[in-house]
């Protein structure tokens, strides 16, 4: 259920809420500041984290940048999803 992030292409947990970095946001492919318009062909589902990296850059730039950041962290994003919870070793 739900589409993958169109920047990093990973699944999105739609149960997460802002300001969680892995929560769902609609990203405008062409930033409004650059003359983009809000319509279906100019937006896509994205993680808040990926959307923040993209900023006012192009989609192509953002995909490359996200891939670099994930590679630098052995495939793990700098901030892990909070839904992973805590260890229960103390219980
Ligand atoms: Zn993403």
Image (spheres, helix red, strand yellow):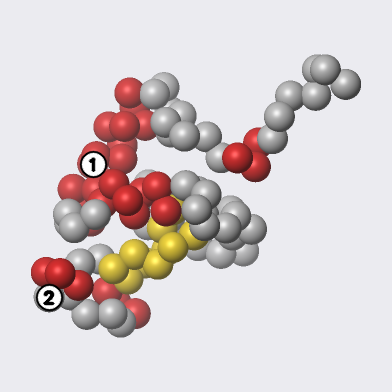
Q: Is residue 50 above or below residue 35?
A: above
User: Quarter holding the N terminus?
Assistant: bottom right
Q: Which mark is residue 90?
A: none
Q: Nearer the viewer, residue 88 or 66?
A: 88
User: Quarter holding the C terminus?
Assistant: top right
Q: Which residue is mark 2?
A: 35
Q: Is mark 2 within 8 Å of ligand 1?
A: no
The number of numbered badges drawn on the structure is 2
Q: Residue 60, position in %: x, y? A: 20, 52
Q: Quadrant of residue 84?
A: top right
Q: Residue 33, position in %: x, y? A: 15, 69
Residue 12 appears anywhere in the view: no
| Label 1 CA crowd tier, 10 Å (few <14, some 14–19, many 20+) | few
Q: Which residue sits furthest top? A: 89
Q: Residue 79, position in %: x, y? A: 47, 34
Q: Is residue 15 above or below residue 50?
A: below
Q: Secondary structure at mark 2?
A: loop
The structure residue drawn at horizontal position 31% and vertical position 32%, both measured from the top left corner, is: 69
Q: Which residue sits furthest left? A: 34
Of circles 2 and 1, the one toward us is 2
Q: Is residue 54 above or below residue 35?
A: above
Q: Which residue is mark 1?
A: 64
Q: Is residue 4 left or right of residue 52?
A: right
Q: CA distance from mark 2 to mark 1?
A: 23 Å
Q: Residue 66, position in %: x, y? A: 31, 40
Q: Quadrant of residue 31?
A: bottom left
The structure residue drawn at horizontal position 71% and vertical position 29%, both measured from the top left corner, is: 86
């Amino acid at each position: 259920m739900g589409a993958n992030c169109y920047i990093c292409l990973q699944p999105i947990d739609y149960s997460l809420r802002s300001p969680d970095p892995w929560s769902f946001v609609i990203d405008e492919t062409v930033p409004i500041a650059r003359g983009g318009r809000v319509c279906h062909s100019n937006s896509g589902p994205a993680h808040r984290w990926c959307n923040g990296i993209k900023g006012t850059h192009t989609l192509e730039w953002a995909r490359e940048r996200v891939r670099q950041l994930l590679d630098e962290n052995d495939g793990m994003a700098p901030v892990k999803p909070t839904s992973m919870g805590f260890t229960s070793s103390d219980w």
